[in-house]
Image (tube, rainbow, N blue to C red):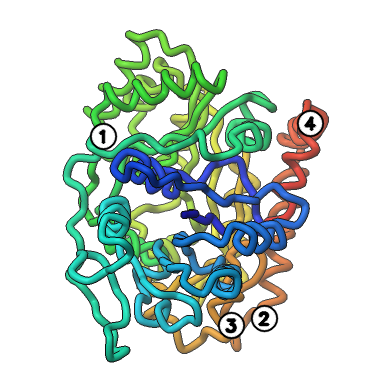
Amino acid sequence: MALVFPETIYAAGQPPLGVGYLAASILRECPGVEPVILDRSFERNPRQALLRDVREGRYDLLGISLVTPHLGMMKELALAAKQARPDTLVVVGGPHATMLPEETLAIPGVDIVCEGEGERTLVELLHAGGNPRGIAGMVYRGEDQSIVREPRRKEYEDLDLLPLPARQLYDMEDYLTHWYSMDTVRPGMRGTSVLATRGCPYSCTFCQPTISTMFGNKLRKRDPVKIVDEIEEIRDRFRLEAFMFEDSTFILDHAWVRRICRELIDRKIGLIWCCNVRVDLASYELLRDMKEAGLRKVNMGVESGSNRILCDVYDKGTTTEMVRKCLADCKQLGLKVQGYFMLGAPSETRREMQETIRLAADEPFDDAVFDIATPFPGTKLYQMSSQNIVLPFEEFDCFQRTVYNHAGELSPQEVADLKRRAYWLFYLHPRRFLHTISNILAPKGWGRLLLKVRRV
């Protein structure tokens, strides 16, 4: 059997840990089953390479992890699998399939949709010889071709019962070589990502209720000792210098974060790291304690320079004043800061987008990512703006194009032009220009730059 991560355009240095968790569960609980992970992100032509893998592999089961921008590739892979071996069981999971199970099941070649967390569901499907009947989390066609939707599977209460991602099934050297999450700290470090939580209690319209449907609205946390066990193990196996907590709401529970920090310090792990932060959760005292444990960079979800957009459109629960306060605390502690920004939200004006660009360029951020606001299916953002969406799901691309027909102030092309201008203004700003050049000239810096430029 094979598990597919169908990224064919925007390769990055973070391995697809979700697929790794699935593979690890199968290896532990299904003796005799040897899953492979098909991931051709760094090939010259990843689309052709993936299709070739599927056709030549003639797998009995093909599991595809699906987010909306990968929909077109998923359709090609499902058909290729059936053409190579008609009895291949094609199972599709992930956020897109979970939010649109019946629509996903209607795609030619798809046999089963797996809703929500898939580790236990996929293991039970393998134990049942591919028969989904009675397995929680499965959506499939019955004998009369009607759609059968089994009850949703409850989320794992104890994440520590899951095996660690099967990183041995990736080409980890590719990911280590292209990892650029901490280039603003020191270019070219060997690093990778770790997941410590699942779930999110917040209501941001661009993520919810998709995240809660996938993982629940309660933050479930792993044992700090086991988290640091994993970090120590991958440090030694891959000769790491750094790592990233990839969790979107890592610092919600300050006491738990401090326990992780204490483990890192007491065990002399000796790595530096970064994580994502919400500006309303990141106190100076917490950031100080995290720095003592190796924190050197934070990734800050800013989203917009307009409080109206943050409140009325994104329901973010933060303000630009909170952003500036958190940024000042980080700078006082000597931390690098990367900001995440979005342009082109429903009803957003040119002035409001320019406020976002000015906030990014003029404040002391060290790095930035500018996305185009994209209403992925099932999110509140999609529900509130679906009447203005003019592109099919296959063309959703938060890096390159807006899905909206902005009949008012800005056209789709103008939004894309503003996004490109934002990057130029940010990285050619006098305070960043020399650092930008030094990153490009660093070992392997040109290759990492090319990965980033694809998103501009």
Q: Amino acid at mark 4?
A: Leu
Q: Amino acid at mark 3?
A: Leu
Residue 391 tag number:
3
Q: Earlier in the sequence, mark 1 or mark 3?
A: 1
Give the class, few, some or many, for how many residues have Cα within 10 Å of label 1's Cα (few <14, many ≥20).
some
The amino acid beneath tag 2 is Ser
Q: Position of residue 252 (x, y in %)?
A: 28, 40
Residue 222 marker: 1
Measuring 61% from the left and 37% from the top, which residue is drawn there? 171
Mark 3, other Cα within 10 Å: few <14 / some 14–19 / many ≥20 = few
Give the CA separation, mark 1 to mark 3: 39 Å
| In this picture, residue 407 sits left or right of residue 195 | right
Q: CA distance from mark 4 to mark 2?
A: 34 Å
Q: Give the residue at mark 2.
A: 411
**In the shown orientation, is residue 168 left or right of residue 456?**
left
Q: Position of residue 380 (x, y in %)?
A: 35, 73
- Between circles 2 and 1, the one closer to the viewer is 1
Q: CA distance from mark 1 to mark 4?
A: 40 Å
Q: Quadrant of residue 133?
A: bottom left
Image quarter hosting the C terminus: bottom right
Tell me whether circle 3 and circle 4 mark residues in contact (CB < 8 Å).
no
Determine the CA span between mark 2 and mark 1.
45 Å
Please tell me how many numbered marks the rendered image carries. 4
- Residue at 60 percent across and 85 percent down: it is 405
Regarding mark 4 in the picture, which secondary structure is present there?
Answer: helix
Q: Dividing the picture into quarters, in which one does residue 337 lie? A: top right
Q: Earlier in the sequence, mark 2 or mark 1?
A: 1
Query: Disc 4 vs disc 2: Cβ atoms closer than 8 Å?
Result: no
Q: Which residue is mark 4?
A: 434
Decide if residue 223 is on the left or right side of residue 211: left
